[in-house]
Image (cartoon, rainbow, N blue to C red):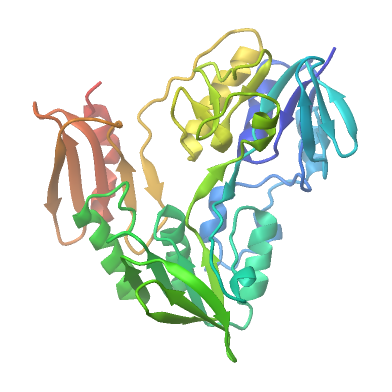
Amino acid sequence: MPPIVIVGSGLAGYTLLKEIRKRDTSTPVTLVTADDGAFYSKPNLSNALAAGRSAAALAGASAEKMAADQHATVLTHARVTAIDMQNQRVQTGSGALDYGKLVLALGADPIPHGLSGSGAAAVLAVNDLADYAAFRDALDGKKRVTVLGGGLIGCEFANDLVHAGFTVDVVHLGEWPLERLLPVEAGRRLADSLAALGVNWHFGCTARSVEPTASGYQVGLDNGEAVAADVVLSAIGLRPRTRLAQAAGIPVGRGIRTNRLLETGVANVYAMGDCAEVDGLNLPYVQPLMVQARALAATLAGTPTPVVYPAMPVMVKTPAHPVAVLPPKLGAAGGWKVACGDTGICALHVDDCGRLQGFALTGSETGRRNTLVKELAT
């Protein structure tokens, strides 16, 4: 019997494997990964420095243990280079592998920073355990870190770095952090809270160049300013990995396009996680991934189960000022009603009839998220 083949050993791929085994203990499953296959949770990479956690400490289990525990085959250091859909076969650097069902759980890559200057090659991004290990090594003995991007990951790293004792500058194109998710009042409260810890914000500008200096690097901004740094971290966003699918003729948009059953435009090929665009939505967060894994495992076990997302607030790991946000649906009419308190902000997105469509909570107000979820308009 050709196995179910899962390409990718991130949280998506391994969660799917676990969910499959809850329902089906007999169908062979092979997970193929380009790295060493260690199981870890990627969201933990952005808040592990202050706790002194190494890359090894973040790895929960080796590929060998995951394979044994889940009664599966895990092929490590085996990059899939092509998909032969007619013969239902994937080509890897170590040979061909037949599949009955193929699941692409490829993840996403950091968006290229596009910086000029002879120091640009030294700019780091943290997207996996190996990146995190390299980042920790680069920080050894250093004091000043410049973070490019004030989105979710940039804010989490800024908070973690300043707690770990580093001087932190954040360069952000928006006028406040997380401007795509938060109204201005909530974003500025988060920025002020991080600034109180020592984060230096550079809003409304972008980095253009990185040049080495006698003591580190100089980051040149498009407004003419220059920021001194020992280490530069790019956190300007992620781009779903679609090249493998596109080369095989599988439809892609922002991500690999699927319907609610996570079926691509090709028979017996599915996609999930950060690489997938499910019914028009690419949701690179943990909760959607978990919902997808449970639904797809049921589908692969013979019970077609569409993905149905519950209300899924996003928690931003910024202990300086926690944030919980559930954005309104794209195109939703209405606007924000914002109440500012001393210890937090409650911003509710309501329509013209006063029905709740989303929320952004900061500080002490984040404790209201579960109550507000129940009040959402359906």
**How many tags in the picture?**
0
- For the view shown, which residue lies furthest in the bottom direction? 214
Say which residue appears at 51% left-offset and 18% top-offset: 259
Q: In the rendered image of this protein, does residue 314 appear above or below residue 270? A: below
Say which residue appears at 53% left-offset and 49% top-offset: 43
User: Image quadrant for the C terminus?
Assistant: top left
Near-viewer residue (73 or 221): 221
As drawn, is 45 to the left or to the right of 24? Answer: left
Residue 190 image point, x, y percent: 29, 61
Residue 213 image point, x, y percent: 57, 88
Residue 126 image point, x, y percent: 59, 58
Q: In the rendered image of this protein, does residue 132 appear above or below residue 304? A: below
Near-viewer residue (180 or 75): 180
Residue 171 image point, x, y percent: 40, 68
Residue 164 seen by the camera: no
- For the view shown, which residue lies furthest in the left direction? 353
Residue 351 seen by the camera: yes
Q: In the rendered image of this protein, does residue 201 appear above or below residue 259? A: below
Give residue 373's quadrant in the image.
top left
Give residue 360's quadrant in the image.
top left
User: Image quadrant for the N terminus?
Assistant: top right
